[in-house]
């Protein structure tokens, strides 16, 4: 069984369908799965990124691939959000509550 968060992306890349997600709502690892159909079944799970911000009161969520933004060498643009359980801390450091963007090359099967 594939466990995904409530935010995910399905797109076609390299002849296969890809599903990009975090394993849990507040998980720090971003995964890609491969399948032959946009409905799955999904397999070949691989970690493509681990969010460095996740620690203490800081958590990440809503990993999302933007397959319409592709760089020939860097791969596909992926975004995720960062937040804190310490609400007042967000006012002290506004850099926390921002989306992050990373380039990832989807795995080849």
Image (cartoon, rainbow, N blue to C red):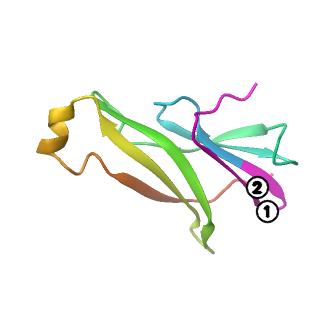
Picture quadrant of residue 101: bottom left
Residue at point 32%, 39% (across, down): 83
In which image quadrant can residue 14 be found?
Answer: bottom right
Label 1 Cα neighbours within 10 Å, binned few <14 / some 14-19 / many ≥20: few
Residue farthest to the bottom?
Answer: 72
> In which image quadrant can residue 46 be found?
top right
Secondary element at tag 1: loop
Residue 101 located left or right of residue 96: right
Let me know if residue 101 is in the magenta part.
Answer: no
Q: Which residues are magenta?
A: 1-18
* Relative horizontal placement of residue 9, taking residue 85 as reference (left or right): right
Q: CA distance from mark 1 to mark 2?
A: 7 Å
Left or right relative to 18: residue 96: left
Callout 2 crowding tier (Cα within 10 Å): few <14, some 14–19, many ≥20: few
Q: Residue furthest right?
A: 36
Image coordinates for residue 16, horizontal then vertical, percent: 82, 55
Q: What is the x, y in percent for residue 109?
A: 81, 51
* In this view, 72 is above or below 30: below
The answer to which of 52 and 21 lies nearer the viewer is 21
Picture coordinates of residue 72 (x, y %)?
63, 75
Disc marking residue 5: none
| Number of numbered discs overlaid on the protein picture | 2
Q: Which residue is mark 2?
A: 108
Describe the element under mark 2 as helix, strand or loop.
loop
The residue depicted at 71 percent of the width and 38 percent of the height is: 45
Identify the image quadrant of the N terminus.
top right
Location of mark 1 (residue): 14
Instruction: Tell which circle, 1 or 2, labels the residue nearer the N-terminal end.
Output: 1
Where is residue 26? Give x, y as percent. 46, 30
Q: Specify whether 71 is left or right of 18.
A: left
Give the foreground label among 1 and 2. Answer: 1
Q: Are marks 1 and 2 in contact (CB under 8 Å)?
A: yes
């Amino acid at each position: 069984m594939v466990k995904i968060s409530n935010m995910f992306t399905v797109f076609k890349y390299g002849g296969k369908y890809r599903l990009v997600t975090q394993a849990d709502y507040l998980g720090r690892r971003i995964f890609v799965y491969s399948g032959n159909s946009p409905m799955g079944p999904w397999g070949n799970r691989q970690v493509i990124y681990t969010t460095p911000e996740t620690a203490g009161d800081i958590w990440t969520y809503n990993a999302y691939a933007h397959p319409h933004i592709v760089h020939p060498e860097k791969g596909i643009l992926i975004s995720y959000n960062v937040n804190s359980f310490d609400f007042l801390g967000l006012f002290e450091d506004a850099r926390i509550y921002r989306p992050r963007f990373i380039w990832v090359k989807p795995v080849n099967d």
